[in-house]
Image: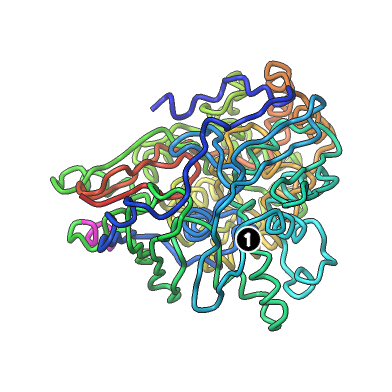
Amino acid sequence: MANIFQKRTRRGLFLKTICGAAALIASGAGAPYAAASGKTLVYCSEGSPAGFDPGLYTSGVEFTAGAAAVYNRLVDFKPGTTQIEPSLAERWEISQDGREYTFYLRRGVKFHTTPWFQPTREFSAEDVLFTFNRMRDPNMPFRRADTTEFPYWHGTGLARLVEKIEALGADRMAVRFTLKEANAPFLHNLAVPFASIHSAEYAAQLLEKGKAPEINQKPVGTGPFIFRSHTKDTMIRFDGNPHYWKPADVQLSRLIFSITPDAAVRLQKMKRNECQVSVYPRPSDLAAFKADANLKLRSQPSFSMGYLAYNVSRKPLNDVRVRRALDMAINKKAIIGAVYEGHAQIAVAPMPPLQWSYDESLQDAPRDLKKAKALLEEAGYPKGFTISLWAMPIQRPYNPNARLMAEMIQADWAKIGVKANIVTYEYAEYLKRARQGEHDTGLFGWNGDNGDPDNWLSPLLSCEAMHTANQAKWCNKHFEELIQKAARTSEEHERTRLYIEAQKIFKDEQPFTPIAYPVAFQPVRKNVSHFKINPFDVTVFSGVTLK
């Protein structure tokens, strides 16, 4: 398991290098898909996606249903790892100064044929330009017709970083990204679901028909599975892609998501063979999964973190003494025992220990209710106050029971005179309202997307992410300078030094309380082959088959 999370390899991003030439993969349908005929796999998922356009979301629910099944990116992660491998770009070059990335595109890649779209051409640079210019330019016609936001694009600073994107060559089968400054995480960011490539031709047809928003509900990509239908809160249907450019990845003729929010029902469906793979189980169900001879329970250290955010744009949470008091009152050890049933590590830093640059020197302040009350009195709240405490409505790998966690925190805060009213919404609404800053405090989580430290600190804590995944709405100038300098730096030792300094500022300011670094579990039926837990909170079915 440790090898899956090995991230200390030198990436050499700022040397001119040609990558991936040895990994060219033949296109065509071939024998593997023929062997998949008649094989249907049912996946017990935890909730309906709000949509299928990966650029609009930051949640594993949408990423699994859209990015992992329907789409490809220029580069992708090797299954089960954080290592970059070629995808729609078969190779790439990086300039000496680290500002230019040139991608040479794979030929012969076909977009999906569906009842609502019949492509007339193969994948090309036009599709790459459309995908990223839609995020970059709010005035482009498609963006004006479909007024959406792109949280990952903005939250990671890519909106500020990318200076130009251009197609190269007479056949337009190469694309060059020019950055305003060197950026070490850039290549890894292009493997994250938000960077999934759309069909420019399909988008043009939707625009002409006045139906631009349908790109989010009727997805068309180049990926291993073709979207067929979605019945909200019930089912999503996909077919295996018979023309996939990487035929060995299509071992199923049909893939069905059985949307099952209730973990107890998922357990029973797995036992009855109504599902062959399930989303992460409740810790209380682990023993039942292990006891069933027909099931396998996969596990590995999770590249994720559950946390409690303090909305610093609201009083009294704008006072660091209040945040420290609330943090000091929380009994994390009890939460690990009750919510995770011991299958987690107490979290201290804003990233997990598996992430290189994790600051091992950070420590929580001792739990001290008397001192917490003194801090509240010093801040002007000797009798406490009332705030909202938001709890996610669904189970996530980083928080298997948000309601229980919220109730435990509510009880802890009551001991220092703080009354917390627990609030919840349907998950898509929960995230939407949180981005708008309607919460006082709230339970959230993050699963690493790309194996780089920037992926934790920029989306969750940067000033640029205040209206996206930065649920604390916290902006600290010194912290911002440190993480931006680290992103411009190629040498890993120096980046680590900068990130450790940034983590110390985080701990001093306490914009959120890290709660837990969990162990990831995922159950499968024993007749499922070639399934791997993905470190990035996305369930991937490429190459998965049934015996």
| Of residues 254 and 355, the one drawn nearer to the viewer in this rendering | 254
Here the colouring is: rainbow
Q: Is residue 267 left or right of residue 338?
A: left
Q: Is residue 320 left or right of residue 396?
A: right
**Residue 481, image x, y percentages:** 83, 32
**Residue 355, image x, y percentages:** 56, 28
Count of picture labels: 1
> Which residue is label 1 attached to?
198
Query: Relative to 104, does residue 426 appear above or below in the rendering?
Result: below
Q: Is 34 part of what is drawn in magenta?
A: no
Span shown in magenta: 264-270
Amino acid type at circle 1 is: His
Viewport quadrant of the N terminus: top left
Which residue does the image show at 42% across and 38% down from the upper left?
336
**Residue 370, image x, y percentages:** 59, 35
Query: Relative to 87, does residue 364 appear above or below in the rendering?
Result: above
Query: Is residue 457 among the parts visible in the rendering?
Result: yes
Which residue does the image show at 72% across and 30% down from the upper left?
184
